[in-house]
Amino acid sequence: HRTPTTRVPGALAAGAADRGTRAGPGADDNAACARSLTLTPSATGLRQATLQIADDATGSPQSISLSGTGVAPNTPIVSIAPSPLTLSATQGTASAAQNITVTNTGTAPLNITAITFTGANVTEFVNPASSCTAAIAPAASCTIAVGFAPTAAMGSATRTETVTLTDDATSSPQTVTVNGTVTASACTLTSAPSASMATVNAGQTAQYSLQLTPGLGYSGSVTMACSGAPA
């Protein structure tokens, strides 16, 4: 009795390559052949395929389940937090700087080539020098400090700027929006109704009582001007 010879066809599932020897017709009983498979993943994660062997043995074709794991190539990956960043301050003051943290979660060094600050209100933000100047190793991070120094009065629309990073990650460029809220005006001017109106004869003077209250944290000079008075 002769054991049927197993023949391995050359066609395989997509993403796998095979090479090796195959038993030919009339091979000895209990002979074996070898087949080498190579996984070439097109994505990360679990990859699966089935190898089918057509032959003249009972149960043909035989199936073999194949599995492998695709891993990311050596490349930097950028993670930024917080995004967006929100700051607040009184008009005419500067908030404490807060950090935007840039982390390299990839497997190769991250090289940042430029950090730019743009936006309609960029002049109301404080952008000191960043620590993101050297290559960032995998699992390492650097920081970008941003402060808020509003010139707009309370009640103005949210002030914004955009921080843009240019680097060698595939997601470049990355952007972070920084929002600034004016929590109080530099000062408020109030007056009792009875102190804001007076009847004055020509050539005479009148006095008006006004109260100037600084906003939280504000310290500085205030210039006042009178307009609309009769000639």
Image: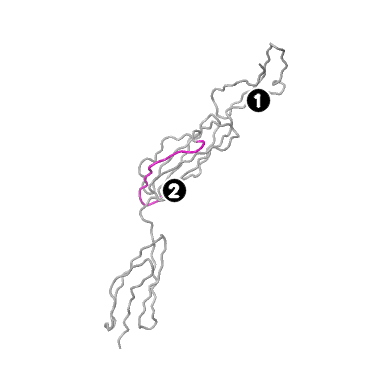
Q: Residue at x 64, y 23 (%)?
A: 211
Amino acid found under the numbered disc labelled 2: Ser
Mark 1, residue position: 190
Q: Nearer the viewer, residue 124 or 85?
A: 124
Q: Secondary structure at mark 2?
A: strand
**Does residue 62 appear to the left or right of 97 in the view shown?**
left
Q: Residue at x 40, y 71 (%)?
A: 50
Q: Secondary structure at mark 1?
A: strand
Crowdedness near tag 1: few (<14), some (14–19) or many (≥20) residues, C-alpha within 10 Å: few
Q: Quadrant of the C terminus?
A: top right
Q: Residue at x 56, y 37 (%)?
A: 181
Mark 2, residue position: 79
Q: Position of residue 226 (x, y in %)?
A: 62, 20
Q: Nearer the viewer, residue 116 or 97?
A: 116
Amino acid found under the numbered disc labelled 1: Thr
Q: Is residue 226 above or below residue 88?
A: above
Which quarter of the picture shows residue 207?
top right
Q: Position of residue 124 (x, y in %)?
A: 51, 33
Q: Is residue 8 above or below residue 224?
A: below
